[in-house]
Image (tube, rainbow, N blue to C red):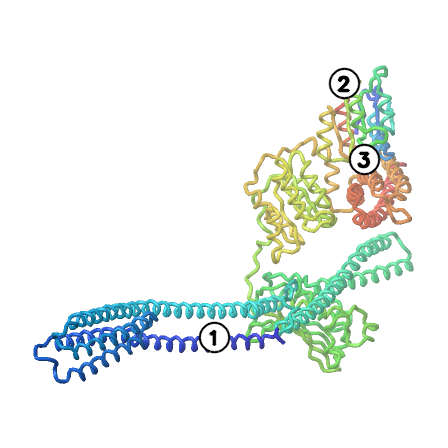
């Protein structure tokens, strides 16, 4: 896993309630050399962090199932505030309706849990490179 | 008494006799009255007319004679006076007859008047004969006499006329009489006929129809239709008695049938209970055995290892007993699955004795097989069941033999129409009394044998059921102290050489990657199918009951290509699910459905096809067979183009491989994690996982034994991803099933899945700790 060139300047918003997954994602992000990781374990809290006044994040990584609000709620809110921020959805649902729904709300990428760290790293690398 | 059939028949007979007598009497009467009529017709009116005419003639002749005599110039003839009297008497005699025979009373008035006139006329004639022709009174006397004569003639004419009228009147009245007699007779016969017909109808309605009804009821009852109501039970005659007896018969039959049903239900319940219990015990038993094996590998000291080995062996023998019971209860329930395959007898027997050779050698016994060379090389039958029987018999023989050995022998008997297999030993032998009970359930020759040798005593009972299911017989010949020979005979059917075709040629034309839904409640079946299907590049989805399957077919986008539908599933069976899918709107209803069913015999398959399934495979599923069916359903390997979402497939690659894999652990995932993120990160994640376990376990395995499905689903949801990331594939799969069961609220399924999860999780933790130690060791090695 090669660290990103300008990783230190990147800011990532992570919304994930599951302690294990949160740790795994943070581990991967650190390996990539991401400078700032703002983590929430509650969907509603994550939404409240997304305001027009705040400095935009370079990437949002969100779980689908969370207390407070779902990843889909967060996605809709992000799209309303920052149109172009890349959004990576994590989910244990491999169901087709998930894909359709997420695509309809302009998700940039998604990853079905469980995933290998490399798979996440590849997607993050692609998304921040845009 | 008046309602009995005897009385009715006697009454009917009496009426018939009466009718016959009446008809006879009427005939006699008619004949007689007709005779009278004829006589009277001839006599009376004719005589009256004839004599009236005669009297007329008599008088005219008399008058003429008198006229001639009186006007004769020669004077009166000699005998004139005598002649006058005689002729007048004749005239009066004729008049008498007219009087007598005349029917009209007026006639008698006129004849009386005629007699008076005749007397006057006679007197006038006599006076004239005394008188001289020259006498002055002569002419007037003559005139008076002639006037009297004319009056008589006129009156006679009237009498004659009246007699003639009488005749005509008589004719009319005779006609009337005849007509009346004919009418009366007709009326009487019609009345009698009506009476007879009425009696016949009454007899038919009263006797013949009820008898027919009773006959029908009897036939239906005898045919087993107990819903028939017995008619005419309230009658008080012979039919009533018969109906009453039939009612008693029906009651008795109902009692017998009820008892039979109860007995059958009890037997069924017993078998089901046995099968269920065995099954329920088997699942945790597998857990015990698995964990014991893990325990044995965990570096125990010698004493601990010995104890654990004993646990393992005891568990294994318990499992064998359970399998025996399961097998037997299946056979007892008539569910023997006997296949017909081609097999090679020699290799079957060699394989059997090879399996038993170790045990024989342990006891220092010889074991040999002898096959009659006259037997065909290939036979048709069920080699697996035959092997089971032979293994059982040979195993018993080894068990009960201390010195010498065992011979497994096969030959033909009954002119080559039957295969006879013998297992002869040199053991303790069996007494005649014991031999008769030997093939019953739970029986050994001597209960002390159970203590010495163990076993359920079900082996021979199973063998007997199997042999009988193959249409054969089983038995034993033995001399106590000199060994026993167990034998069985089954129909011998020559088979054909086994070709290597069995594996199938489905690979020849590869089928495009399909989206397949496997609907099966059995986790092992799912695993096996997932492995086989994924190997051929198909994408596999799972449903554990019919309802989920229908929902998944409905929601699938792009639509599924194929559903492999287990017929027996909880909540909604495969038949109902198939019908529900066929009733879906849109293209989803057209998905191809293959039934997986254990009951391919009878109309099981037909019912699948009727429900709308396209094909079937028999269970347990032979993957080769499944692929043949799939190949048949997708013959050109093309079909509609596969809209295979690369991104989607890629996004779920890890999850998919975990789901479709069969191995319990994927060490590569941990290795990969350690490589990509560093070993300390991997250790950290393992510790994180181990630390969240105590948090989730109380929800999954509550101490009160009643997990809350919704909560279990949530916990299992988060557990499965974490477990999957660490390579705990089996925990991942079981947790996914638990989540699904929790979401659907299937408490029964949840209970067995959770106990499975408990086992998987325990094994997983042991494995994870091993891996953790390995990573640590690698770090320590690399560290300095």
Towards the viewer: B628 or B350? B628
Q: Are marks 3 and 1 on the same chain?
A: yes
In the rendered image, residue B369, in percent from the top left (x then y), is placed at 66, 71
Query: What residue lies at 58% left-to-right and 64% top-to-bottom?
Result: B380
| Labels 1, 2: front one | 1
Left or right: residue B579 versus residue B98 is right
Q: CA distance from mark 1 to mark 2?
A: 117 Å
Element under label 2?
A: loop
Q: Chain of mark 1?
A: B
Query: What residue lies at 68% left-to-right and 71% top-to-bottom?
Result: B248
Q: CA distance from mark 2 to mark 3?
A: 36 Å
Element under label 3?
A: helix
Where is mark 2, residue-wise?
Answer: A83
Q: Quick check: marks 3 and 1 in contact, CB under 8 Å? A: no
Q: Residues within 10 Å of mark 2 (few under 14, many from 20)?
A: few
Element under label 1?
A: helix
Where is mark 1, residue-wise?
Answer: B19
In the rendered image, residue B777, in percent from the top left (x then y), is placed at 88, 42
Q: Looking at the figure, which quarter contains the C terminus of chain B?
A: top right
Q: Chain of mark 3?
A: B
Q: Is residue B316 above or below residue B607?
A: below
Q: Quick check: marks 1 and 2 in contact, CB under 8 Å? A: no
């Amino acid at each position: 896993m090669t660290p990103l060139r300008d990783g230190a300047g990147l800011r990532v918003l992570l919304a994930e309630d599951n302690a294990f997954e949160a740790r795994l994602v943070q581990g991967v992000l650190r390996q990539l050399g991401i400078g700032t990781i703002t983590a929430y374990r509650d969907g509603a809290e994550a939404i409240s962090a997304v305001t027009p006044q705040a400095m935009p994040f370079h990437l949002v990584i969100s779980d689908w199932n969370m207390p407070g609000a779902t990843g889909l709620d967060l996605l809709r809110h992000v799209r309303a505030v920052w149109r172009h921020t890349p959004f990576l959805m994590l989910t244990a649902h491999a169901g087709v309706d998930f894909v359709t729904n997420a695509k309809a709300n302009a998700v940039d990428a998604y990853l079905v849990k469980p995933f290998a760290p490399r798979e996440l790293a590849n997607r993050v690398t692609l998304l921040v490179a845009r | 008494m008046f309602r009995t059939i005897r009385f009715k028949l006697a009454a009917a007979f009496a009426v018939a006799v009466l009718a016959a007598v009446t008809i006879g009497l009427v005939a006699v009467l008619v004949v007689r009255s007709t005779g009278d009529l004829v006589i009277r017709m001839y006599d009376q009116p004719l005589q009256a007319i004839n004599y009236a005419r005669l009297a007329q003639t008599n008088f005219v002749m008399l008058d003429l004679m008198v006229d001639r005599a009186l006007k004769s110039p020669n004077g009166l003839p000699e005998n004139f006076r005598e002649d006058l009297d005689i002729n007048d008497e004749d005239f009066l005699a004729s008049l008498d007859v007219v009087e007598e025979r005349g029917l009209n009373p007026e006639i008698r008035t006129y004849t009386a008047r005629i007699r008076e006139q005749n007397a006057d006329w006679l007197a006038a004639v006599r006076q004239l004969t005394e008188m001289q022709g020259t006498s002055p009174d002569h002419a007037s006397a003559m005139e008076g006499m002639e006037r009297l004569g004319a009056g008589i003639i006129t009156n006679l004419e009237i009498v004659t006329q009246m007699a003639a009228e009488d005749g005509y009147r008589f004719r009319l009245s005779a006609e009337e009489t005849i007509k009346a007699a004919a009418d009366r007779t007709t009326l009487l016969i019609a009345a009698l006929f009506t009476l007879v017909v009425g009696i016949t109808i009454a007899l038919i309605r009263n006797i013949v129809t009820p008898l027919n009804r009773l006959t029908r009821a009897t036939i239906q009852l005898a045919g087993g239709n107990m819903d028939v109501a017995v008619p005419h039970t309230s009658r008080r005659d012979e039919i009533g008695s018969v109906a009453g007896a039939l009612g008693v018969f029906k009651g008795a039959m109902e009692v017998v049938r009820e008892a039979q049903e109860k007995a059958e239900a009890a037997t069924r319940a017993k078998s089901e209970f046995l099968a269920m219990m065995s099954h329920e015990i088997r699942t945790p038993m597998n857990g015990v055995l698995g964990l014991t094996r893990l325990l044995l590998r965990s570096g125990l000291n010698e004493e601990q290892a010995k104890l654990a080995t004993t646990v393992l062996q005891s568990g294994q023998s318990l499992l064998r007993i359970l399998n025996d019971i399961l097998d037997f209860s299946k056979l007892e329930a008539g569910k023997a699955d006997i296949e017909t395959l081609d097999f090679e007898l020699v290799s079957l027997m060699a394989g059997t004795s090879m399996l038993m050779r170790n045990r024989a050698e342990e006891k220092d016994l010889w074991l040999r097989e002898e096959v009659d060379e006259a037997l065909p090389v290939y036979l048709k039958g069920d080699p697996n069941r035959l092997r089971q029987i032979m293994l059982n018999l040979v195993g018993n023989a080894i068990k009960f033999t201390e010195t010498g050995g065992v011979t497994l022998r096969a030959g033909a008997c009954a002119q080559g129409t039957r295969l006879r297999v013998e297992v002869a030993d040199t053991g303790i032998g069996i007494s005649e009394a014991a031999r008769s009970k030997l093939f019953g359930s739970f029986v050994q020759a001597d209960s002390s044998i159970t203590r010495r040798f163990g076993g359920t005593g079900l082996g021979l009972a199973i063998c007997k059921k199997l042999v009988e299911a193959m249409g054969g017989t089983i038995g034993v010949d033995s001399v106590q102290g000199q060994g026993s020979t167990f034998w069985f005979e089954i129909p011998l059917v020559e088979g054909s050489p086994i070709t290597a075709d069995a594996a199938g040629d489905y690979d020849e034309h590869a089928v495009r990657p399909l989206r397949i839904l496997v609907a099966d409640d059995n986790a092992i079946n799912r695993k096996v199918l997932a492995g086989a299907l994924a190997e051929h590049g198909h994408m596999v989805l799972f449903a554990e009951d019919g309802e989920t399957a229908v929902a998944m077919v409905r929601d699938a986008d792009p639509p599924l290509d194929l559903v492999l539908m287990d017929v027996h599933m909880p909540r909604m069976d495969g038949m109902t699910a198939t019908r529900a899918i066929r009733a879906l709107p849109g293209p989803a209803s057209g998905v191809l459905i293959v039934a997986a069913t254990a009951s391919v015999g009878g109309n099981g398959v037909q019912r699948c096809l009727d429900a709308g399934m396209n094909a079937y495979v028999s269970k347990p599923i032979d993957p080769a067979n499944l692929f043949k069916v799939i190949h048949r359903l997708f013959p050109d390997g093309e079909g509609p183009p596969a809209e295979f979402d690369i991104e989607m497939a890629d996004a779920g690659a890890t999850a998919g491989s975990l789901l479709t894999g069969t191995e319990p652990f994927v060490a590569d995932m941990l290795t990969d994690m350690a490589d990509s993120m560093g070993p300390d990160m991997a250790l950290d994640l393992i510790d994180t996982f181990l630390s969240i376990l105590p948090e989730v376990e109380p929800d999954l395995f509550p101490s009160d034994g009643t997990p809350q499905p919704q909560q279990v689903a949530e916990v299992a949801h988060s557990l499965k991803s974490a477990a999957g990331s660490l390579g705990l594939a089996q925990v991942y799969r079981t947790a996914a099933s638990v989540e699904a069961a929790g979401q659907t609220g299937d408490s029964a399924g949840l209970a067995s899945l959770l106990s499975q999860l408990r086992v998987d999780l325990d094994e997983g933790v042991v494995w994870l700790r091993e891996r953790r130690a390995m990573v640590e060791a690698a770090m320590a090695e690399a560290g300095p």
